Image: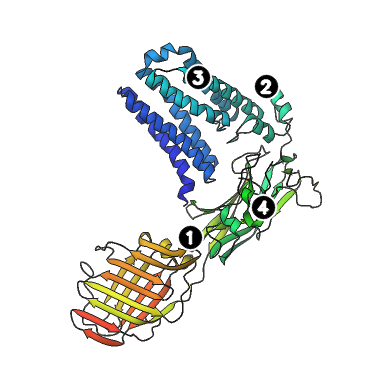
Amino acid sequence: MDFRRQLPNLLSSLRLALVPALLALAWNEKPVAFLSLFAFSLSTDLVDGYLARRWKAGSVMGAKLDSWGDLATYAVFPLCAWWLYRDQVLAQAGFVIAALIAFVAPTLIGLAKYRRITSYHTWGAKLCAIFMGAGLLLFLGFDVPGLFQGAVVLLLLSAIEEIAITAVLPQWRANVPSIFSALRIARGAAPLLALALLGLPLGAAAQLPDLVPGVTDVEVQYGATVAAGDVAEGCAGATSGRDLVRLSLITRNDGPGDMNIGDPKCPDCKDPKNANAVCGNPDFICSPAGGHNHAHYNNFLEYEILDPNGTTVAIGGKRSFCLMETPAPGCTTGHTCNNQGLNAGCYDIYPFYLGCQYVDVTNLPNGSYTLRVAVDPLNRFAEVSEDNNVITAPVEIARAPLEDASLRGGALAMKTGKVLKIRSKSVQVLSLAGSQNDPTLSGAALYVVDLVGGDQIGFALPAANWKRLGKAEAPKGFVYKAEPDDLYPCSAVKITRKGVEVKCMLDGTHTYFDLPAEGDIFVRLEVGATPRLMCASFGGKTKRNDDLVLKRIKPPAASCSVVE
C-alpha cells in the first residue's frame, strides 16, 4: 500500500483521536498543555490537506475524515474553553455566540438536506481556519482578542457561502472550493440558486448528466517502457522494466443533460517549464504524460488495484486527456481541449496505449487482483445517479519465471561455529532488472546442502536489509547488510551482474551442518517473489575438509535442478 496516499487520512484520524485528550486536559485544568495540544491538532488539519494536494491523494473518505476531525475538535472546544477560560469567554460573549452560530448553521442545514455532514472544504473555510486557530490561541493564551474577532467575521462569511453551496447543489458533494465551483457543477446554477433560496424543488429544473464508465482491453504488460512524462506525472515508478495493468476506458454520459467544464485557462502546456503547472481552473494541470503536453482534468478518473481482501495496493495516475466527445452516431459534438465537457448521449474513449492509461503493478507479487475504475471519484459533478460510477474487472498477475542462473567458479569456506563464505561467478552477465529480481521488494533465501550427507542450512534474507545499487529500472546489483543474530545470521550478501558473494555466521542455531562434508556442497540463492534461482555446486579442488573447516575452490558447473 502506498503510505503517502494514506498519510493524510492518518493525520485526520489522529485529530479525531486527540479529542478525548483535549477534554481530559481541560477537565483537569491544564491550560498550557491544552493549548499546546490544540495547536498541534490545528497543525494536522493544515498538513493533511497540503499532503493530499501535494501527493494527489484526495479521496471522498479523506474529505469525510477531515470534516469529522474538524467537527469533533470544534464541537468540544467551547466546552473546554468554558472550563478553562470562563471569564474571557464571557467578556467576548457576543463574538463567541456568533462563532457558534456560524459553525453550527451550515452543518445543520447540510444535514437537513443531504442527511450527512457536508465536506466542502472551501477556500474561505481554509482561510478562516488559519485565522481562527491563531485568533483562539492569542485570545485564550494571551488575552488578545482582536484576531479572534476578525476571524469570527470571516467565519460568518464562510458560513453564508457554505449555506449557498448547499442550496445550489442538488446532491451531496465533497471538496467544493467555492460557490462559483458549485454554480459550475450544477447545470443552470444561477436559476437553481434562486429557486433553492425560495424553497422550491430543484429536481424539475435540473437537467443533469450521468457518467458511466466502461472498461475493455484489460491486459497485464510485463517489462514495459513508458514515457518520461508518465513518470513526471506520477503514473509509473520509472521509464523501463515496469509491469502495467493496461486498459481501455469509455466514459459515457447517459443522462439527459450535458456536462460542461469549460476553458481550463492553462498556460502554454507545450512549454517544458509549465509541466505539471496548475491552470487557471485549479482542477486542471499541464500534463507531460505520454508527451501530450496539454490540459488534464485532475481526478476525473481513478484506477485502483485491490487485493483479495479489498485493500487498495496500487493506484493509477490517470486523470483525463482533453475531455470531449468522440464522434459517433447520435452524438452531438461540441467540446474541445479549450472548452471541455461531454454532451448527453456521447462518450469519451481512452485507448489502452495512451500515456498513463494503466496502473503500475511492478511491486506487486503474482496473484489474483481486482481492477477498480471510478469516474468522478471526488463527486465534483452533479449527476442523475452516483450508483453507476464504479466498475470492476478481475486481473491476474502471473509473471513467467525468469531463467535461473547457474554459477561457476569461485570459492566456498565453512568454519564450524564461526562463518560461511561463498564467492561464485556467472559465465554470462546477469540481468537484474524487473520486480522478480528485486530482493528489496520480496527478500531472498539462501540454502546450503551436502548432496551426499544430506545436511542443510537455510538462511532468511528479509527485504528490509537489502539495498539496490544503481537505478531502479537498470540496477547494477543488490547488497544485503545486517548485524547477524540467531534469527538472521547473514551479515553480508552481494548480488551483481557478474556473480554472488555471501558471508553468514554459523553460531547459535546454525551449527547443525556436520563436517567433514561427504559430497559436493550445493548452494542455492532464491531471489525475489517468483523466485529466481542462482545456484552453484562446490565439488572441485578441496583444500581442507575435516570436522572444523571445509574449503573448496574452482567448483564444477552447477545446474539449479540438482536439488529441488
Q: In this view, does 561 lie above or below 39?
A: below
Percent of width and height locating residue 308: 49, 55
Residue at image mark 3: 99
Q: What is the C-alpha distance between the residues marked 4 and 1?
A: 28 Å
At numbered mark 3, what does the secondary structure look like: helix, strand or loop? helix
On residue 318, the disc is: none
Q: Give the labeled residue for mark 1.
A: 363
| Residue type pointed to by label 1 | Asn
Question: In this rendering, would 156 be left or right of 26?
Answer: right
Identify the residue under disc 2: 197
Amino acid type, residue under disc 4 in the picture: Asn
Residue 498 percent across, percent down from the top left: 42, 76
* First of labels 1, 2 by sequence position: 2
Asked if residue 198 lies left or right of residue 15, the reply is right
How far across and how far down the image is residue 239, in percent? 56, 62
Element marked by disc 1:
loop
**Viewer-side label of 1, 2:** 1
For label 3, count other residues whose C-alpha is less than 10 Å away and answer few (under 14), some (14-19) or many (20+): many
Q: Which of marks 2 and 3 is in front?
A: 3
| Circle 2: element type | helix
